[in-house]
Amino acid sequence: MHFGVPPRRQQRRNRDVKKMIPLTHGHLMIDLEVPNKLIIPERGREESLYCRYTGVTCDPDDFSTNNYFLRQNISGRETEIAICITMYNEDEVLLCRTLYGVMCNIRELCAGNQVVHGNCGAFLGKDAWKKVVVVIVADGRRHIHPRVLDCLAILGVYQPGRHMSNTILGEQVTAHLFEYTATMALDASIQFQLMTPTQIVFCMKEKNQKKINSHRWFFNAFAKLLQPKVCVLIDVGTRPASKSIYHLWKTFDLNSNVGGACGEVAVYKGPQWRELLNPLVAAQNFEYKMSNILDKPLESTLGYITVLPGAFSAYRYIALQNDNTERGPLASYFRGEVAGFGHQQGIFSSNMCMCCRGLHRILCFELVAKHGHDWILRYVKSAVGETDVPHSLTEFISQRRRWLNGSLFASVYALAHFPQILRSDHSVARKTALMIETGYNFLNLCFSCGLFSICHGNKPKASQWKYKGAAISFAAVSAYMIVCAIFCAIQVAHSGKTGPYSKLVLSILCTFGLWCGASMLALDPAHLLTSAIPYMLLSPTYIIILNTFAFSNLDDISWGTKEQVRSEDDLGVVKSKIRGTQNVVEVELPSTEEKDVDALYVEALENLKTRKPKDPPPLDVHAAQMQEAKDYYANIRTNVLLFWVLSNALLVVSILGVGNATATFSDDPSGQRTRAYMTCVLIFVAISSAIRFFGSTVYLVTMLFTG
């Protein structure tokens, strides 16, 4: 007989024992024994025998002033590189892919037989792992994926139990902190791998407060105590190549004025590049490749990369610090995180700060324009990080909505504050180059905002087939245009002289010749064969659908593209007791008997084999997003859309010459206005392509001679 769905298996309650734990500087800090079944090659190292838990009850800005500390502070170790891995509700495959890649990089640092002497010092060698700290910040205890916790528990980094609570001594817990030195790793296929010891700090925030808050925990709480020379930012789902972190660090070590750097963010293609069978993934692969071949080298040559991608980038820690008046890169970066909703923040700041891509634009600008300094930003081609990209059109549109709106308003912010560059300590030549780049960015911004057509007010997930139908229709039009372009080229070749199609063919040759020539010079032409056609077919989707949807949803300042996943039930309360002259707290811990300590480890292994992801609940609505704020944002959106549509209509009228009520298209039989407009566009495309190609070539030549 069938009696319905079997009950969900509950976490095993072992023989918990109540222990009196003395407070450390008034805080709950416990050393938890790791399971004996956990394979540890060097059992004698104490930091691999115990996982340290700390219940944090303060804001990240007050972490050090409230006398919290990390194990590196106790041992007196210096930190050369601090690596921040941010995550939300990604699954165990993405986490293991990233963490395993990072641990492989640390292994390469320890295996290095060369010593690089520079301003960052020399730290390569077998003990290099002691100067590298990996910080994993999970954005919300209730949203972290349960299988991710199982993976961390298997590695010894995380231990569930009654020692975790919501309240400690009457104060709300803001984060659960675990510190452990792992010697094993799980690769992307969830298989054990023996690794070099890796110092890991796992911060599981109690509440979901967005990625920017996770970075505030890293910079203002942990990095302030570690004082690293270089900070590396990585998103879960990004796998750095085996020596990528070394190449990023080397850039800072050899160049004292480098304040930030990024590597090549590549699309994760999967085994045998099977992911490229998805045309959307292939299009993003081509987009990422051309940006890394053309745009990033040009900006690196000038010294100012407009945005260092948060998925894989690095910063010199001292360059990020604020001045005595609390003004500087980090202050500007976190300004939006502490601001409220509605009229207090405004739609400009809300869109500018609603995604880390926009915030990183602000951070990069503030870093280059920092008063009294001459920091520059560099692109490191040899540092490669493969990242996971959207596979569905709805997720892709939602992601780009945040990117486009955030980048647009952040670009306007940088252009409006360009005089700050003149107050920096850059040389006259460097300031001139930066001002030229500012003008170039202004022209690109003007052209990128002028090609819009339709309005999309509904959400992609609720109207999937409408958006897919529009994308397919635009792809068909794009295919027709490609055929027409080939026909025009044939006509020009046969005519043997300049004709009505000559300028069009010249523009096409400039674009395609640029793609092919730059890719060949960079010795990276594979994407031309695998991803060029999907990108060209989907290019109208990039230009029309993405930009239109972004402008039509200026009032939407929500973060994230993934659904929420809730985990376990609520936690308990830790109360204080006085024993003699010592202030202690009573905490329930697993029995120290081997069979009880190992039970949680065995259960995590079993969960990883059997526990499947749960259906996500509906998204929560932030209480602060009141109706007044919604109306305010909607009103601004309407005004922007109205101005946008009218400006496009004005452009059409000026091109077609139908502004006069008595005028007809026959009044301009030779199409002079249309040809003039097309000539301007083609000239701009040709000049822009030439500038990008020149910058890319200069970068390659410089890299050839300097390494």
Image: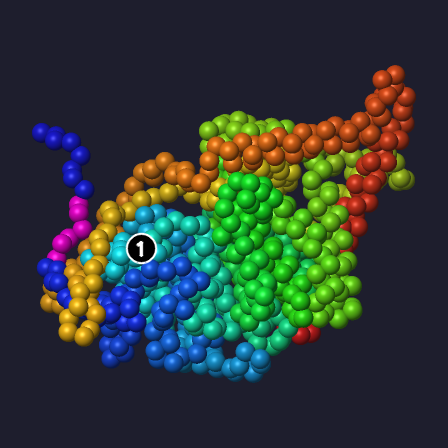
Q: Residue at coordinates 45% horizontally, 68% vertically from top-left? A: 223
Q: Quadrant of the C terminus?
A: bottom right
Q: Residue at coordinates 22% horizontally, 55% vertically from top-left? A: 573
Q: Residue at coordinates 67% horizontally, 67% vertically from top-left? A: 371
Residue 496 point in image, percent of width and height: 88, 40
Quadrant housing residue 97: bottom left
Tell me the amino acid under the disc marked 1: Gln
Label count reads 1
Question: What's the magenta region?
Answer: 9-14
Residue hosting label 1: 172
Q: Residue at coordinates 47% horizontally, 50% vertically from top-left? A: 388
Left/right placement of residue 320 relative to residue 424 reads: left
Query: From this viewpoint, which residue is outermost toward the top?
Result: 662
- Judging depth in this view, the residue of 489 and 697 nearest the camera is 697
| Residue 382 appears in the picture as rendered | no
As drawn, 680 above or below 285: above
As drawn, 411 above or below 503: below
Left/right placement of residue 506 relative to residue 546 reads: right
Residue 503 point in image, percent of width and height: 83, 40
As drawn, 42 above or below 668: below
Query: SS of the residue at dot 1?
Result: strand
- Judging depth in this view, the residue of 6 and 417 nearest the camera is 417
Here the colouring is rainbow
Left/right placement of residue 481 relative to residue 230 reads: right
